[in-house]
Amino acid sequence: MLNLKVARDALADFYSQALINESAPLWDGLLIEGLTSEPPFSRVGDLDNDGRSESGPALAQVWRDGWREFLQALRQRVGEGAILIGAGEAAILEAVQSGCVT
């Protein structure tokens, strides 16, 4: 499982370089799958680096926050010209409504 709270900036940097590389972009867009409002597991370690293991509603909130922050960071880096498409549950609709993904 990927901790988006920790890997957010590294992933956003990697994908933005592939999308907006001035000499030769690798892609003109990105399909981001797995945008779900809850993780596919019920208990895990410390996702938000606060020293406590998350579960239940707290886990779901950290999961949604991680996705939202990653998508916001990615959109900020690639600008409005890159195609970002999200695939997943309707509950992640806030990412679409905020302009992070289409």
Image (spheres, rainbow, N blue to C red):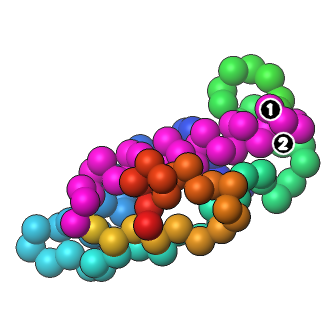
Indicate whether 40 appears above or below 62.
below
- Pick whichever, 84 or 55, lies toward us: 84
Q: Amino acid at mark 2?
A: Val
The answer, for residue 45, to whether it is visible in the render is: no
Q: Is residue 86 magenta?
A: no
Q: Main secondary structure of the magenta part?
A: helix
Q: Which residues are magenta?
A: 55-81
Residues under numbered marks 2 and 1 in contact, where contact means CB atoms less than 8 Å apart: no
Tell me the SS state at disc 1.
helix
Q: Is residue 71 found left or right of 2 in the rendered image? A: left
Indicate whether 35 appears above or below 64.
below
- How packed is label 1: few (under 14 Cα within 10 Å), some, or many (20 or more)? few
Q: Amino acid at mark 1?
A: Ala
Tell me the SS state at disc 2.
loop
> Quick one: label 2 or label 1, which is nearer the N terminus?
2
Residue that mark 1 sits on: 58
- Pick whichever, 9 or 81, lies toward us: 81
Tell me the tag on residue 93: none
Q: Is residue 87 found left or right of 59 in the rendered image? A: left
Q: Position of residue 43 (x, y in %)?
A: 89, 43
Residue drawn at x 69%, y 55% as measured from the top left: 91
Indicate whether 100 appears above or below 86.
above
Tell me the tag on residue 44: 2
